[in-house]
Amino acid sequence: MSDKSSSSEKIRVRFSHLGLVVSDIEMMEDFYTRVIGFERTDGGMTGQGVVMIFMTLDSSEHHQVFLVEGKPDGIPGNTIIPDGPPVLHHLSFRVDSLSDLQEMYKRLQTESDREIRTVTHGVCWAMYSTDPEGNNIEFFADTPWYVHQPYLKPMDFNIPEDDLYAQTEALLSTEPGFQPIDDFYGDLKTRVPEKVPA
Ligand SMILES: [Fe+2]
């Protein structure tokens, strides 16, 4: 028997926040608050002279993102995203609807010339770009459908919402596993017993 503990032991763990080490904390605070919509909840300088900022999108969580200065210059990228940070792959944000996602698409376009990739994963529409320091960020809106994963098809977000919706549905309707997302989760419930916390 191993002495190592496992996740089946009844401790409820929920994800709370992520800390980013940044170069220009004012620029990053501006992007995360003004462009994405985070609320700054706290911030200041420690006794050691380190600047920290706390921000959230959730009124029940003091901070979901924590920024601290101290990022060194010349950090090597990784092998998947050579220009990206060495460890962080992406931060992801869910929006309520396809129209909200298209609004955010326009906002990111006016914000900078940074590349924006727009796709559907079948279960969602998604777009990928970067924050001002090159961290990859994703925004997505759920579709009402399911297709087998992994799935990715580029989509043009510049067309009207109704056309984009219809085009996505037509594209997905011939893909393996296509079904309403509620049917997928209804079936999943019969296969995965409810976990009862201790
Ligand atoms: Fe993601």
Image: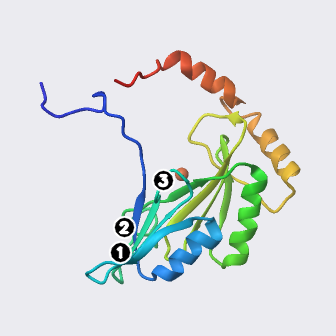
Q: As drawn, is 169 to the left or to the right of 14? A: right
Query: Observer-nearest residue: 5 or 40?
Result: 40
The amino acid type found where label 1 is placed reads Pro
Q: Is residue 13 shown left or right of residue 180?
A: left
Give yes or no for contact between labels 3 and 1 (Cβ–Cβ under 8 Å). Answer: no
Q: Secondary structure at mark 1?
A: loop
Q: Residues within 10 Å of mark 2 (few under 14, many from 20)?
A: some
Q: Nearer the viewer, residue 170 or 189?
A: 189
Q: Please say if the residues under marks 2 and 3 sit with CB atoms less than 8 Å apart.
A: no
Question: What residue appears at the point 52 percent right and 75 percent down from the top-left corner?
Answer: 29
Q: Which mark is residue 61?
A: 3
Quickly name the residue at label 2: 86
Closest to the observer, 100 or 124: 100
Q: Which mark is residue 76?
A: 1
Q: Position of residue 117 (x, y in %)?
A: 65, 63
2 vs 3, front mark: 3
Image point (67%, 52%), residue name = 95
CA–CA distance in space, label 3 to label 1? 33 Å
The answer to whether residue 115 is visible is no
Q: The residue under label 3 is which amino acid type?
A: Glu
Whole-percent x, y for residue 118 in the image:
68, 59
The C terminus sits in image quarter: top left
Q: Residues within 10 Å of mark 3 (few under 14, many from 20)?
A: few
- Which secondary structure, mark 2? loop
* Mark closer to the chain start, 2 or 3: 3
Sooner in the amino-acid sequence: mark 3 or mark 1: 3
In this rendering, position of residue 198 left or right of residue 113: left
**What residue do we see at 35% from left, 75% from top?**
76
Task: State the image coordinates of residue 116 (x, y, percent, origin top left).
Answer: 65, 67
Asked if the residues shown at circle 1 and circle 2 are in contact, with their CB atoms under 8 angstroms apart, the answer is: yes
Look at the picture and state if 83 lies above or below 147: below
- Count of marks overlaid on the render: 3
